[in-house]
Structure formats: structure tokens, C-alpha cells
Amino acid sequence: MPELTPGKFEIIGYKKEDINKITRPAISYWQDAWRRLKKNPIAMVSIAVLIVMVIMVIAGPMIRGYDYVTMNVAQKNLTPSSKYWFGTDNLGRDLFSRIWAGARASIMIAIVATALKLVFGTLYGALMAHFGGWADEVLMRIIEVINSIPSLLITILIMMVLGNSLFSLLVALSITAWCNTARQVRGMIKQLRESEYVYAAEVLGAKPVRIIFKHYIPNMLGILILDASTAIPGFIFTEAGLSFLGIGLKSPAISLGVLISMGQQSMDFYPYQLFFPCLLLCIIVMAFNLLGDGLRDALDPKLRQ
Amino acid sequence: MDSKMNENKHILEVEDLRVSYHTYAGEVKSVRGVSFYLEKGEALAIVGESGCGKSVTAKAIMGLIKGPQGEIKAGSEIRYNGNNILKYNKNQWKDYKGGECAIIFQDALAALNPTMRVGKQIAENLMVHKQMKKQEAAREAVEMLRRVGIPEPEKRVEQYPHEFSGGMRQRVMIAIAFACDPNLLICDEPTTALDVTIQGQILDIIKDLQEKRKVSVIMITHDLGVVANIAQRIAVMYSGMIVESGSAKDIFYNPRHPYTWALIQSVPRLDLENKQTLMSIPGTPPDLLEPPVGCPFSTRCSYCMPVCREAMPETTDFREGHQAACWLHHPMAPKVDMPDFRGGK
Amino acid sequence: SSGKTEVATAGGETADTSGTTDTSDTTGAAKGSGDSVQELNLRASAFGNNYDVQDMGWRWMMAECYEGLLRDVGGADGDKYELAGAESIDVSEDGLTYTFHLRQNAKWSDGKPVTANDYKYGWDRLLDPSKGYSYAAFIFNIVGAEEYYNKKGSLDDVAIKALDDYTFEVKLKVADPTFESKLVATPLYPTRQDVAEAAGDNWGKDWKLNIYNGPYVLSDLVEDNKMVWTKNKYYWDADNVKLEKVNWFDVAEDATAATMFDNGQLDVINGAGDYIKKYDEEAKAGKIQSLATEYPGTAMLSYELQNGGKSGLMKNANIRKAISYSINRDEMVGAVYGRYTPAYGLISPAITFNEKTYRSQAEEPISTEYKEYAGDKTKLQGLFQKGLDELGVKTPISDVTVVLLTYGSTTQNQTEREYIKQSLEQNLGIKVELNTVGDSSLFTSERDAFNFDIMTAAWYSDYNDPLDYLDIFRTGVYHSYGLYSNTDYDALLDSLSGLKDNSKRLEIYQKLENKLLLEDCAAAPLYYADNHFYIQNWVKDFHTSSFGASQEVYHTSVSGK
Amino acid sequence: MGKYLIRRLAEMILTLFLIATATFFLLEAVPGDPLTQRAEKLAPAVKDNLYKRYGLDKPMMERYVITMKGIATGNFGESFVYAGQTVQGLIHDRLPVSARLGIQQVLLGITVGLLLGILAAMKRGTLADYLVIVLSVLMISVPHLIFGLLLQKIFAGDLKWFPTIGWPAGKDLWFGGWEYTVLPTLTGCFSYIAAYARLLKTSMLDVIGQDYVLTAESKGLSKGAIIRKHILRNSFIPVITQLPMSIAMCITGSFFIESIFSIPGIGQYYVTAVNNQDLSILMGETVILAGMYIVVLFITDLLYVAVDPRISLTGKNS
Amino acid sequence: MEDKEIVLSVQHLKKYFSVGKGEVLKAVNDISFDIYKGETLGMVGESGCGKTTCGRTCIGLYDKTDGQVLYKGKDVHGLSGKERFEFKRQVQMVFQDPYGSLDPRMTVSDIIGEGIDIHHLAANKIERQNMIYNYLEMVGLNREHANRFVHEFSGGQRQRIGIARALAVQPEFMVLDEPISALDVSIQAQIVNLLVELQKKMGLTYLFVAHDLSMVKHISDRVAVLYLGTLVELTTSEQLYSDPQHPYTKALLSAIPIPDPEIEQERDMSKIKLEGEVPSPINTKPGCKFRGRCKFAMPVCEKEMPELKDVGNHHFVACHYCENQKDSLNY
Ligand SMILES: Nc1ncnc2c1ncn2[C@@H]1O[C@H](COP(=O)(O)OP(=O)(O)OP(=O)(O)O)[C@@H](O)[C@H]1O
Ligand SMILES: Nc1ncnc2c1ncn2[C@@H]1O[C@H](COP(=O)(O)OP(=O)(O)OP(=O)(O)O)[C@@H](O)[C@H]1O
Ligand SMILES: [Mg+2]
Ligand SMILES: [Mg+2]
């Protein structure tokens, strides 16, 4: 309790400048989301893990000084040791280097496929939402058809048509995945189109292009980021699955999927050859998934203060 | 207020209620030391701006503040018939919620389970508190709907909330609330989302049931018209605190807090002249994340004094339970009267 | 049999032959205990889908459920032939007329006798031009056969005759010492005319339409799951067939098979990869029996000889040779497969010639020359450079890229191609581009589109004579791997026709093999196939043969399980 | 309602037609044809015969028309590769096997998944929640094949609790021989458990924040009653949305499960057929699977209506 | 009043929405009125009666179903590209929801600047900046607010940003779609005062939509009362409150609670209590829309939709009962 003096009891009223003052610091949507993300320890751990992963997939294959393709048959199937941290495979290649090289390919494939999916899905979804009516119906039907054909068939056939290459792998991976994005974008735009700020822009005379770039896209980014964060682990996982069917990457290129499927075939004898790539796959998938969960919370408008 | 003395008169006493929400942005001090009481059979209105903590207070009384985000600070007391409900055990809570005390929310559509038949939502309450059998409860539900004036209740119990209009939904909420003859009813802005014509109907039903069943009501609203219609006593809240409380007449005709003054004045009246400048409260309420040190209203108060910025004013008692927390009532303060214009200048 | 579990069987349509022991129809494991259960559990990694003997659809099944004139029986010194459907065989002096006296007590599984007509029908069918059996060439040497097949003659002129019910006679154009070895092959098995004709277009497709004349009857088959043989009670030698039932489980994963074998749910397992090491040790400890045999197959690298491949370089023998010698076969079989024998010749050690294994009589053509180059990068690169110079190609070696066509997705497939790629890259300093396709039909398309320089290939021979290996390189034979064509080679092959003198034949065989591998380097042999069977101790008399059933259970029995 | 059904049926048929068309042309685009392998060793004349027999000598558009006509009459033709096999036989022999496997997987997966989801949602932020998260990610990221082999090794190999391979048939086809189905079902259900646990958790957390849950609480209902009567049903909408995906997932996943446990279902056959470009079988299987998917989609719509009265089949819904 | 210039003339405007299965929702069903330059026309009615739809159709945001909207004599729905662009500058709108009407990903200066950019009203960046500051101050906000994001603002502040955005293109006519109904009482007055002040300063014309009759009366020169897509009464605000004609208007006025306990308690007895709920606007029956809740309903109300008629003194009412009463009074 401060000391009460008569001087403190003079009516001064409010100050005009003060009344509209905002005490909190200026903060943008993204800063706010980031701030909330930062408060989420699991998401932060995931980010840290992913950063380590990124560093490792770049540097990992070099750390031990072993080339991940050159074979050294004399050193085959060695158990983990101080020389070969994760052991060697059946051609005597350092598993530690190979795993990071595999993760590199896996992550890169996943990221590119995600980008493809996002770009195509967004365009497609935007077209559906924009044209509506008849065109929407037709485009929606196409999605339905693609969704009803088992994706495995599409994937294998695409790999057959385009040949077994990285490019066709990417196409095959993203071709069934974009539907979801397209649907989401369509729903989102349909919802945004009815939002008052878009009406406001229209009332101001804004052209469609402006509305798309100034309003639709920034407001969809959250959803797209979320979509990406769940799609990436999905792709890593799907690519791994394709490797089991022998339609993954072409050797000598390796991905985690290739490593796991090769490890599986010797799991009775050299379980570590399966264990390490599996572990890494789990960690990566888990990190992305948990980051996705964190992002969902951080980007959730309901939690905004 | 001596709680023992008022034991039989006061059905509810809230003392130094403090509630915080823990969010990513920090601790939101939603309610910051609220004290009031409610007499048996009385209707108390809590008025105040959006976000001042009215609903949180109501939820606290209803026992709906949940961790891990929500926290009722230690030292808070909510006494129902003299018992501190915050110390209730599971069974006591069960009897209290719905049986002794009921609540009606603002948005009836959101407050009704969209996937459960209306009749069942009412019957559910009856089955918990009156140990009724299913069929018995179902019959009673029809009666409840009839009582709140829903035509063809036999058919209506079989319908889902979305098949009801806004007014009818709110009536269903009232039916649920009254199903087990509570002694205390909390209405959290029950009519804000409704049209004036429907609002009248709802208020009438509440008043009617209140009188017939001698229920004590806490009516939360920011519509002074509704307050004038229904309340015997009023508590004015601002920024998580009660700044003034007293009988309806005290508050409307003899308000003592500058915020109450401003509130009453800013409501346009039908008897005013066209396009007059309305009295308004400038600025916006303080951020409950970082509430100001002194009087929370000081930033917008035309009677603000330096002391207001430094310390929280103490509560001054006027006659018959009329209280206000404002430095203007300090002996050292200059004498200020409530401006005599209403709703405009 | 209430309360018993019925497992993936199609029901009792074929129960007539198997009604007695078929009470417990359980796949998972032979739960039976005690000596009396004469039931064997074996693994198959896939079931065939062709039940037509003339098409040689599914040799390991047919060799046990059907019977031809002769039976191939494996042994320590290679395979021998036993009389089976034939009681005796008369060969005319000139070696042209073969008269088979058939066993009079041989019966089909419906109880009817096996007659000479059944053989005649089967052989005629094989030659029927409208059927287009690819193994028809087996008997082109019969008078009138090739003409009939090529629609230049009629069936009446074909010298295949049923003299009476139990005498079957054929006449050859020229004497052929390999003819007898072909008789064990299923295309020359009998076929019952009435049954085949009743089945019409579905003959060979629906196993339920078949009847059998072998020791066992195929009594149930569920694709991707299980096949059951039961003893054929009409079989002439049924007294010596001890097993009542043979279960074949379709087990895709080696790991699963190993689990089942370790559990006693499988009686025999064909070891692969690291399992060989594991089971060899167990066998040494006496816990199980082991049976390792050669198998008549040779894996090799083929070159695109038609156009010289994508690089155009495969036309040159020195380049081909450099490639061939860059691969350390010893290391490769060890690292990649953990089994097999390094191959420096074409003809597998499983092939017998003149009652002895061919390989014991003929040195492997490239074994000596290979040693000169082995591991010597300068020499190998010199050889390659020599080839480049001969072709007049100016590209430096390090800029040369060759395409290796492979298929398959198992670890073994992958390591194999990586091993080859790296061997070539390390030893020759060239670049190897992999053209990997997922399955064999795509492989065929890629091959026929000549989208390769080198490809992996293998030949598994159809009858027990070196000729079967050497014949595939004859000009115009579709099987010519890489489309090898050499008139001298063809002429040498032709000189074998009618040649009965075994020592001369041996000489020519050696010449052919040398020419092919040493002079022309038309292919680079990698390894000879083999089999590593591991057998539970309670299984007796389990055999293996190269041209009959690889898992020969004719006389097998179970005791002490 | 009748009108609605007719419209749905028409839509389904149209979709199936489009699917069949897409499949046909996709397969056409693949180099080679289903007979390449079989015809490889044949003489040209015989080869022609073979091609003629399967109608592969005709131009593409004609074959397309023939194929479509066949589908319309329910006749997909015989397999190109497995001569004599037909789609009808496939439906008869293999579909029930896969169906049982799929149904068991989905039921078990969804049940356990939902239980875990409820646990995670109710205990949000606790160890149990994190355990469920970790477990579900683990279940998703370890391939089926590895799970299957491990289960097989441990429970069939070492412990001998269950048979290693096999699947009930005959009278046990649908109800019986449970011991055979345990391991395959377990192998397959993991991914469902993971997917549904996560899904239900998210949607329950959504529902828990709703006002009507507060209303229920204010009625004095017990926690269990609130979950059962108010939260669950309202959380089911996203779960239902996932159902058709599960059917799609079922097919890919079952390939490995069927091959590990020697189960004669359609999954194995499907992959083989794709690799063989076995047009008729593929067409049949695809149309069947897509049909199933569409039917499940339809059932899903019915379920929506059953779960959420706000949604109506015929009218526009929110 | 005839001498006043008509800014916006709405003639028999209809706006139907199809809501699936061939059902139509007649949100605006044959409405006619004029708005004069410099005036404020208030529009009241219960939630869902078509106020927003009417406002949006008037400025061409929605296509009309039938009828005509003339802005300065030109058909709003038939403007050419250039005319339309200019129209969009002259006519602006302030939205009901201060939370939903501002793009959450934009800063205040971008929001206010959007109109300036679209219509190229600023020569350069500095001028644009100054204009934005200018408008911010005009609506009572500070310059410092320019770089903030909307979620940091309270409802009243947001609504002021919304007004500044509309003002930024220097419009002549503004549709205010319930600009205050989402706000607190204490803040409502701020906005209303601001709007009145701006109107005086800039000579704006308003169509002020609200459901709060007391506020509407306060700000409007004339008031139009809507019921279920139809206009039931239109007159000056004084007249409406002193002499309401339509039974619905009467009920509406009496239902407004007065913030004075004594008056309110007294009034409680005499209030006109409307029975029943507002019927659904989907597939409405012919005749007067209000008849179901009207105690004066007559047989004719079942059959004919009453037309909006002048009962004297530019007081328009659409009611058979009032018509008859006047008739009997006149004769
Ligand atoms: N679940 C919650 N999490 C975080 N903060 C909350 C939560 N509930 C309420 N608050 C905060 O507590 C303060 C008081 O909220 P409350 O709902 O009591 O306001 P109110 O007076 O009822 O307003 P209104 O008139 O808008 O209903 C607000 O600042 C609000 O943001
Ligand atoms: N885009 C639309 N599609 C279908 N129906 C609509 C649409 N917009 C409005 N409506 C319907 O038209 C009617 C009039 O709606 P409108 O928004 O104009 O009412 P309002 O008077 O502004 O109500 P409020 O006071 O709630 O804002 C309502 O029944 C509404 O449901
Ligand atoms: Mg509230
Ligand atoms: Mg509106």
C-alpha cells in the first residue's frame, strides 16, 4: 500500500494516448505460433532431433571415413565395434555410413514428394473450389476414382510405365497422395471464400489474383504446413514399404527402406543390420509426427489468445 | 459479511475467488478476488464487459474449472449452504452438480449434445439425481418440456437439438437445469444470442420458474435491460473483480463506481434525441495477462487519480449491502457525484 | 471330425485316393506323434500353375505324381536312370529304333492300366503344331516329327507307334546317344487321351482334371498356401511307397521356413544364405542330416552380341573377356550367396557324361587364363584397352559406360548386381549403369529391346547331357543368350549328330565349350548351382535328383519322430 | 430414400466404370504384355494362336470395348498368366479368406486403437499419453513384414503358442481355427491401432473442449458416463471418415501378411497379378476392391447419419 | 424529402438461395426502398430475416434473383468492368463480425492499405503510409498500431480498423452490417459516435443494419423493419418509435428491455408478448409472413401478402390490419 497523500487524490482522468495502448509486444501469427511451439517440449525435442538428423544425413556418411557404396568383402557382416559403429553389411560396407546415406535419400524423396503433392494438390483444390459446380463435380470424381483404386496398383504400374527411376518413384509416391491435399484446399478455400475478410477485399474491388495471393494462400499455409509435416513421415514410410516389394530405389542407391528390407533378410543372423535402420526410421517418423502434433496445436486458431 | 450470521439467509457465499488459466502466453488471471453472496430465492445479476470473468466465476461456482489449464487459487472459498464446495468429495460433487445447482449457458446449441435426443438429455439428469428409471425419466422429460412452453413435447423429446430453433433450445437448457429442482440456478447470458422477442419469452420462463420454485438465480449478462427486468441485486464486474454491488435500485439509481456510471450512461435510451453523442467508455479493458497494479479501471476512468494507478482501492460499504471499490470514496478524495445525465449528454 | 480345424483345403473332391488317413487336416504343423504317421512336410516357395506334362510345367511335382519310361535317380556320382514305366528297352543295332516294353501292372490313379497308347498320345500331343509345345524339339529326331511339327508332314508319317497295349516303339532319324537321357523329362511322359480330351482347353490348367500314374497323387492344392500329395494306391510299386501323405507348404520367407524347420514343422529345408552355415553346424553335431548336391544350372553374364550393346563395345571378344575376368568368382560366391561353386566353364558338374561327371573329364575352359588376369587391374585394363583399340574406339576407358541389366529385388539380387557393378568399376575403371527391373517379364522386354550391354542369365538344363548346354548357343535357337552366332560353332554342333563314339563326343564337347568361352567369350560363367538340403533325423531315404524331382520322396519314410 | 439409393447406385456404377477404364489404360501403358513371358519360347505361329486366344491380337480400343462389355456382364475373362483361373473363382476361393483377415484386423485394430485413444485423451500430458504416442508411431513405422516375422518367430517358433502358418478353410472358413488367425491378425492390426488411437485422441480432445461436455458435467454425470454418452459418439465422425482408407490400407498390408503366413487371400494374388500384368485378374480384383471401397464409402455415409443426426443422407449437410 | 437526391434505389429486390433438393430459401423477398444522400437508413429485424443478404445484394456482393438496385441511377448488377471498379470505391461495407472480417495474417497497415493499393490512391509509399496513419487516427487509434496484427486488438478496436479500411477508399455510401452487435455496450457507443462523427464530417450515406432498436433509432434518420425477408414498416425514426403501426414493430419495441428497474418492472405487465418462433424462411407459404404470431391476423392475411403502403407522412406499412384501420379512420 503506497503512502496516501492528498496529492494523489487529484482527479487527472485518463490519458488519451494510453487508452488504446496494447501492452503486449507486437507479434505476428507466425511468431505467435512459434512461441507456442517453443513452449511445447515434445515439439522442440522433435525439432532438435530433426536438426540433428539433417546434420547427420549430410555429414553422417563422411564421419567414419567409409564410403557407403564401396565394398570390402573381407570385412563383411561384422558386428558393431569401435571401428564400425553399427557393423558392416554383407558386402563389408560400413552400416553407419550407409544408414545416414539411406536416411538422406529417404528424407529427400519424402520432401520432394511432399512438395509435389502440395503444389499439385493445392492447384487442383483451388481449381475445384474456384470453378465449382460442374467442373468441381468432375474433378471430385477423378479424385474419387484415384482413391478407390488401390494405391499399390497405381504405384506399381507407374513404376512399370515410367521405369524404375527416382523420378518415377517420386511420381508414383505423390500421385495418390495429392488427393487429400486437394480436398483440404478445396474445403479451405470454400470456407475462406465465405469469410468476411474476403468479402471485404471484394468490396474493395480486389481482383481474384490478389485475393488468392494475399488472402487464400497465407491463410492456408498453416494447413499446408500441417499437411506436409504428416505427409513427410508418410512418404518415408511408404517408400520403405515399396522397397519390400522391390520397387523402391534402384541399387546402388539406398534408402532406409532398402536397408530395412535387406536387413530383414538377414535378421536371423545379423539383427543389427535390421535394427539400426529400423530405429532410425522410427526416430525420424516419430520426430516428424510429434512435430506435426505440436504444429497442430501451435497453429490451432482456437488456442490463440 | 459474517457467514455464520447469514447462514440461513445466504444460500451461496463466494469469498476471495481467484481463478487463473495457464496458457501459452502466460497466466491469465481471469478472476482476481471476487466476493459476493446470494440470498435464498434472490436473483443476482452479474454484469460486466466481455472477458471480465463472469463466465469463469459461474464455472467456478458450478465446479467446472478443470486442470491442467484452469486453476482455482488456494484461499478461494465458495460456500454453498455454509459448506465450502471446493473441498467437496466425488459424491458431494455429484449431488451438488445438477441436483443442487444448475447452469444455463449462452450458446444453447453448443451446450446441447448434438447427437443425443433432447428427451434423453433431460432424462439423464433425472436419472442421476432423482434415481428415476428410464421410462419414468422419459415421461418426466416430456413434462419438463411442456413446462417450459414447448408445444407437442411428446414429439419433441424424440428430436435432436439442431431440429429446434434458438429460443426452443434455450428452453431445453432451462428444462435440463430445472429438471432436478435445483436451489441455485446460474444463467450465463442465456438470452444474448436470441432476438428480443424471444428473449422476453425466455426471461419470463426463468422468472416464472424462479418464483414458483423459490430458486436462487445468478444471472450473468451484459445487457442492463435484462438486469433491470430480472434482478433484485446486481454485482458489477470489471477485469476479474467486483467493483460495485448492491440492490438493483442502488446500482441503477445511486451507483457509486465510475465504471457503473459509465456503463449505465453508455446505453442508448429510446427517449434520447437522434444522433446525439453517446456517452462511451474510451479504450479497452486491461489485459488479464498483465493486469495493472492499481484500479483496473484507472486507464479508462475520467475520475482517475494518481492513487488509482498505484493501489487497488478498498471496498467501501454504503447502506444495505451496497458496496463499491473506488478511491473516490476515500476520505481524502474530492467529492464527486454521479453525473446526472443518462445515456447521453 | 468335429472340433478339428480344417485348413485351407478345397474340400473332398479328390478324397477317393486319400480317404483313409485324412482325418486331421491341419496345415500348421504335423502335430502327429509316434512312428506310425507316414507324413512328410516340405517347403515350396511357389507352386507351379501348369499341370500339363508335355509342357514340363512343374517338374518337381510331375516327377513324383507321374511316371515316364525312365526315372532319374540321384546319387553320389551324378544321376542314374532306372526303369520305371518301361520294364525293358530294346535298342536296335543302328541305334535308330527304340522299343519299350511297358510294365503291365502300371495303372493310372483311376485304376485303368497305363498303355502304349497313352505314351503315343502324349508324344503325338507334344508334336502337335497347334499346341505349340516348346519341348517338341526333344523328339525332332524321330522320323517325321519335325516335319509334322512344322506342318510339312502328317501325323501318320511320324514314327511313334503303339505296337500293342504294352509295346511302344519309336524310330529315330539318326542315332542319338542323348536320347535316353531325355526320356526322364516330363514332356515324354504318357497322357491319357480320354481324360485330356474331356478336359479340352482346360487340360493342364485345372489340376482337378488330371489323373496320375506316379507314386503319389496330387490330392489338394491351394495356391499361395499348401499342396497335398497322397499315396497312389494304384501305383505298381505302391508297396515300396511308405509315405501316406506329403504336405507342401508355400512358405515365402526363408526366416519362416527356418522357424518351421527348427520347430519340426518342416522335415526338409533347402538351405540358403547364412542358414547353410547354421545348419551345416547342426548337421555336424548330428542334430540333423545334410544332403548337398550339385544342381544342373549355371549362372552367367551374357553380352549383347547382336548390336554390341548400348555401348557398342560388346562386339569385341577382348572386351568381353576383360569383363569376365574382372569378376572374382570365389569372392563373389562367398560374399553374395554363401554357397555355390565358382564357374569357369559352362557345363555344370551335375551333368554326367559316360557315367562320370562331365567336369571330371573336361577342364574348365577359362580357369587357367582367368588366373593370369585375376585381380590384376593393369592387365585387365590393358585387355579392355586392346579391345577398344581393335574396335577403333577412342574413348578413354574411364569414360566408358556399360549397362548391366538385372532383375529381382531380394537381397541376393541386389548384392549380386552391386558386386558385379563394383567389380567392373574397380577393376576396369569403367562406369556401370544398372538397368534394374522388378520382374522377369519386364526383364524380357528390356532384353528384347536390347537395352543393355551385359545381363545376368542362367541356364538350367533339361536333360542330362553337355549337349543341352552347348545347344543353346546354336545360331537361331531362341535361347541363344545374347544371340550368339558362329558358323564354326554350329558346324561343330552338327558334327555331333548321329555320332555314337563317346570319346569323340567328349572331344567335340570340349572344343565347343572352349570355343564359346575361351575364344569367343560369348558368356561369362559365374557359378554352378547347387542344393543344400537339411533333413530331420527322423526322415529316412530322402533323395535328390537333377532331372527328376529335386526332392525325391519316392522311397522316403518317417521313423522315430 | 429410394431415389437417393438409385442415385448412389448410379454414381457407384459410373465410378466403377471410370476405375475400370483407368485401370485398363494404365495397364496398356505398361511396356510388354501379360503373355510376353509365356510366349517367349513359343514358335511364332503358336504365339499368334496364343495371342488370338486371349484376344490380344486385336487393336487396343477394340479390346477396351470387349473388356468393358465383359465387366458389364460380370465376366472378366480368364487369367492370362494362371491359365484357367477366373475372377469368379477368385471371389469364391480367396475373397472370403482376405475378408476374414481384414475384418478381424480392422475390428481388433479399431477396438484397441480406440481404447488407447481414449486413454491418451483422458490422460493427456501424462506418461500414458506419451506411451500411446510412441507406441503408435512405432507400430506405424515398423514394416508389417518385420512385425509378422518377429511375431512368428516368438509366438510360433519359440513359444509354440500358435501355428506358424496356415489359415482355416472349409467349414472353419469364417468361424473356427482361431489359433491360425491370431498372429496374422495381430500383425495387421498394429497399423490400425496406431492410426485409430491417434485419430480418436485428437477428435476426443476436440470434443472435450465443447460446451455440451460442460453441460454434461454440470449435470453431475460421472466421468465414465460423460465419456460414454457424450464424448465418444461425437468423436466418431473423423474415425468414420478413416474407415474407407482402412479398407485401402488392408489390401497393401495384407500382401505381406498373406505371404508370411501362407494365407491364400487376394492380397498376394493381387501383387502377383500386377507384376504379371494379368489384365483380366487385375481388372477383376481392382473392380472388386474399388467396389468394396465404394460400398464402404456408402456404409460410411450411413454411419455418419447414424452417428450424427445433424447429417442427412438426402439433403445438403454441413 | 422528395427533393433529396436518391443514392440507392432498391426496387422489388429478391434474393433466393437454393438449399438443395429444389428447396429455395427466400432470404430477401420483394423489398423496395430508397436511400437519400447524407441520410442513415436503419434496418432492423430479427436474426435471419435477411438484413445481411439485403445489404450485400445492394452493393453487388451477391447476385440478385430479381428486381433492381440502382446506385445513382445505374443498375448495380449490370455495371461494366470500369464502372464496377469505381462503384466499389464509392460503396463500402463494414462487417458484422470484427473477428472474422479482418484477415488474421495481415498487419493493420496492410488491411487499411489494401483499398489504397487496389485503387491506386497513393502516389508513393510515404503517402500511403501517411494515409494509413491518417485513417487510423481518424478512427481513434494510434500510429503505433499500424504494424500490429489484428488478433491483438479488442473487438471495438477491430471494428474501428474495419471502418478505417472502408474509409480508406473515400466512399460515399456505406453499408454498415451490424457493426456493433458483436461488441460490448460500453464499446458500442464508441463506434456509433465515431460513425455519426464521420458521417457529419464526410457527408456519408449509411445503410445501418442492426437488431438493436434503441441503437438504430439513435443513429438513423429513417428505419426499415424487416420480417422474414419482407419489409413490414418504413418511416422516420421518431415516427417509428412514437407511432409504430405494424403489429410486429409494436411487439419488437415493447420487447426491448429498458435499463431501468422501475420502468421495466412496470412495463413487464403491459408488454406485448409474441407467441411462437420465427418461422423458417424455406418454402414459405403465401400471405403475410407474420400472421402466425399476429393476434390481429385476418383471413385475408392467409391469402395475400400485404403491400407496403403509405399510411401518411411517408410512413410505409405492409399490413392488412393497419390498412383497414386507417381506412376506417379516414372514412
Ligand atoms: N479455458 C480458458 N483458457 C484460457 N483462458 C480462459 C479460459 N476461459 C476463460 N479464459 C479467460 O478468462 C477471462 C474471463 O473470461 P470469461 O469467459 O469469464 O469472460 P466473460 O466475462 O464471461 O465474457 P463474455 O461476456 O465474453 O462471456 C478472459 O480473458 C478469457 O480469455
Ligand atoms: N449463402 C447462403 N446460402 C444459403 N442461405 C443463406 C445464405 N446466406 C444467408 N442465408 C439465409 O438467408 C436468411 C437471411 O440471412 P441473413 O444473413 O441475411 O440474415 P440477417 O438478418 O443478417 O441475420 P443476422 O441478424 O443473424 O445477421 C437466413 O435464413 C440465412 O440462413
Ligand atoms: Mg461469458
Ligand atoms: Mg446478418
Image: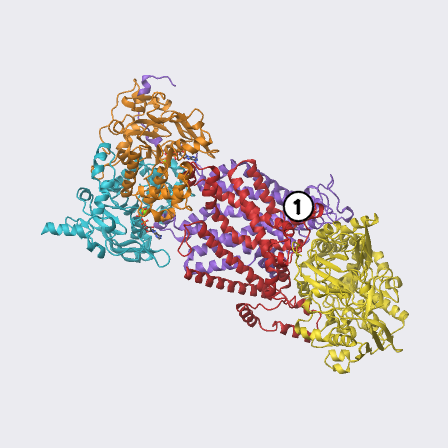
- State the image coordinates of residue E246 (x, y, percent, origin top left): 20, 48
Which corner quadrant holds the C terminus of chain A? top left
Examine the image and state in which quarter residue D76 appears: bottom right
Q: Residue at x 55, y 62 (%)?
A: D287
Q: Residues within 10 Å of mark 1 (few under 14, many from 20)?
A: many
Which corner quadrant holds the N terminus of chain A? top left
For chain C, give the colour: yellow
Rendered position, C251 above or below C129: above
- State the image coordinates of residue C362 (x, y, percent, origin top left): 88, 63
Rendered position, D295 above or below C131: above
- State the image coordinates of residue C507 (x, y, percent, origin top left): 88, 68
Report the side of A189 relative to C452 (left or right): left
For chain D, give the colour: red
Chain coloured cyan here: E
Amino acid type assigned to the residue bearing label 1 in the image: Pro
The residue where tag 1 is placed is: A277
Residue D288 appears in the picture as rendered: yes
Q: Give the chain of mark 1.
A: A
Residues D150 and B325: in front is D150
- State the image coordinates of residue C217 (x, y, percent, origin top left): 74, 65
Rendered position, B160 above or below C97: above
Report the side of D92 relative to D121 (left or right): right
Residue A299 appears in the picture as rendered: no
Q: Indicate which quadrant contains ligand 3.
A: top left
How many discs mark residues in the rendered view? 1
The local secondary structure at tag 1 comes to helix
For chain A, give the colour: purple
Residue that sits furthest to the left in the current view: E331
Rendered position, C434 above or below E145: below
Residues D97 and A20: in front is D97
Chain coloured orange here: B
